[in-house]
Image (cartoon, rainbow, N blue to C red):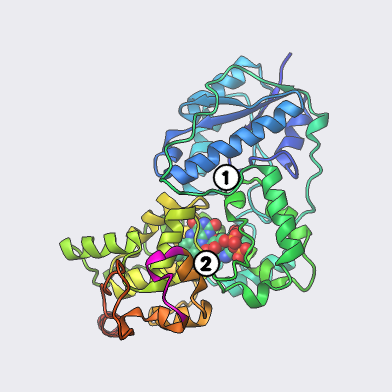
Amino acid sequence: MSAAVLWFRRDLRLGDHPALLAAAGEGPVVALFVLDDALRRPSGAPRIAFLYRTLRALDEQLREHGGALTVRYGQPENVVPAVARECGATSVHVSADFAPYGAARDERVARALGGTPLVRTGSPYAVAPGRVTKGDGTPFKVYTAFYRVWAARGWRAPAASRPGDVTWRALAGTGIPEDPRLPPGLTLPAAGEAAALAAWRSFRRGRLDGYASERDRPDLDTTSRLSPYLKFGSIHPRTILAGLGPGDSAFRREIAWREFYAAVLHFWPDSAREYFQPAMAAMPYATGKAADEAFAAWAAGRTGYPIVDAGLRQLLAEGWMHNRVRMIVASFLVKDLHIEWTHGARHFMRHLVDGDLASNQHGWQWTAGTGTDAAPYFRIFNPVTQGRKFDPDGAYIRRYVPELAGVRGREIHEPWRRPEGLPDGYPERIADHAKERSESLANYQALRDRS
Ligand SMILES: Cc1cc2nc3c(=O)[nH]c(=O)nc-3n(C[C@H](O)[C@H](O)[C@H](O)COP(=O)(O)OP(=O)(O)OC[C@H]3O[C@@H](n4cnc5c(N)ncnc54)[C@H](O)[C@@H]3O)c2cc1C
């Protein structure tokens, strides 16, 4: 008996799944996942482990409904047509991918499938990238204008996909690999659709009301922590948006940032690697041994600036970092250490469980003053005042920087001022913020004078 193939990618769930509905409409469904080295290679162990755990959770869900996940290894343009032939597929169903690699891969697979159609239904976004444009059809470069049109356009209600009603078929496969070796002490969130839904419900019950006023406070941990689940599609943003009320616009706006950056990357695929504002590529950046050493100190969370170090150590410990602190550490790398944003973006992509090309590269470009929006280069985060403002008692710093755990009160933000000196083991500052800030501003002015 023939079947339809549902090729899972960034939609690792069974609920609210339009492509699953479309596949099930044709008959029995083969649930396929392809282990593709082109995507595995740039991912660090934390994201790979989280992916494998998400796949295991999906496989268990399928087994509860009499199916199983068929996992194959290789290039999708070879694997997908082979699976389609094996089960006599009438078509292959996917949620559309709009990122540069995914879109090109899907074109190759569609060609390789020959007469078997690759059917794209839905996407990882509430509104598919490309749909929200200015009146003349050109893309938005500024978030606020994008948001207005995106919010007015609206989105569909969650799809009622019912996995229990589907006849699942499984083929032989390689199985889901063992987790890679993880750095000692790393803690990852629970994976899978049930965990995503539980995280969403717990956020909505407990923290959503205070989100607008407290979202910038890393010490309070008040954000949703949904980013790893959104990354792999364990929950669809539509499910989240459907649960928001009119008073939840601060949270809706953050979901929209993810949609905005996906749209920007769709229209400007080169912006994953290249400067969104090309003129900014001419900024002078530090290179050589001293810059390498500064980068290594930054990456290890040993810059001597407590909030910066806490953030980078949170990244190593959890594969995640609070958004405010992502901005602080990114600004510090680019504007205090004068190191190009691409190096920081690569470090983030290796360690983040939620590492997402669109949000990460554009989050970096925004902070570096090279990206969308009028985020001006001369907005330079002061790591001391940012720490005082957003981690007032230093609780966040103490959580991740044990050398500073015994430092009481607000002097934790400037431990070099303590009469008794730095606590044992905590590094001297690797840069003087006031001096480096002036240098960055002078470089920027020189660039403007030249252009
Ligand atoms: C330098 C830098 C790099 C970043 N890299 C990534 C990345 O690789 N992957 C990623 O998902 N986010 C990235 N972000 C955005 C943001 O930091 C995270 O989405 C957020 O911290 C995730 O935590 P949360 O789920 O608790 O967020 P919440 O505050 O609860 O927000 C809910 C959701 O909205 C979306 N969102 C919120 N803020 C942003 C934003 N500024 N840009 C895009 N989407 C947003 C995310 O999907 C998030 O899960 C980056 C930001 C910066 C400044």
Is 92 left, or right, of 375 in this rendering?
Answer: right
- Element under label 2? helix
Residue at position x 71%, y 17% in the image: 2
146 over 24 or under it: above or below: below
Q: In the figure, residue 222 lies in which quadrant?
A: bottom right
Mark 1 Cα shell of 10 Å, populated few (<14), some (14-19), many (≥20) = many
In front of the other: 106 or 64: 64
Residue 407 magenta-drawn?
yes
Residue at position x 26%, y 84% in the image: 435
Image quadrant for the N terminus? Answer: top right
The numbered disc on residue 383 is none
Give coordinates of residue 345: x percent, y percent. Answer: 39, 58
- Element under label 1? loop
Q: Is residue 176 visible?
A: yes
Q: CA distance from mark 2 to mark 1?
A: 25 Å
Q: Is residue 122 visible?
A: no
Quick one: label 2 or label 1, which is nearer the N terminus?
1
The magenta segment: 400-408
Which residue, given by chain and number where applicable, does mark 2 sit on? 323
Report the image quarter containing ligand 1: bottom right
Give coordinates of residue 178: x percent, y percent. Answer: 49, 30
Residue at position x 61%, y 28% in the image: 32
Task: Say whether mark 2 is within 8 Å of ligand 1.
Answer: yes
Residue that protrudes farthest toward the left in the picture:
289
Which residue, given by chain and number where applicable, does mark 1 sit on? 97
110 over 258 or under it: above or below: above
Task: Say whether mark 1 is within 8 Å of ligand 1.
Answer: no
Mark 2 Cα shell of 10 Å, populated few (<14), some (14-19), many (≥20) = some
How many numbered dots are placed on residues in this image?
2
Give coordinates of residue 391: x percent, y percent. Answer: 51, 76
Residue 91 magenta-drawn?
no
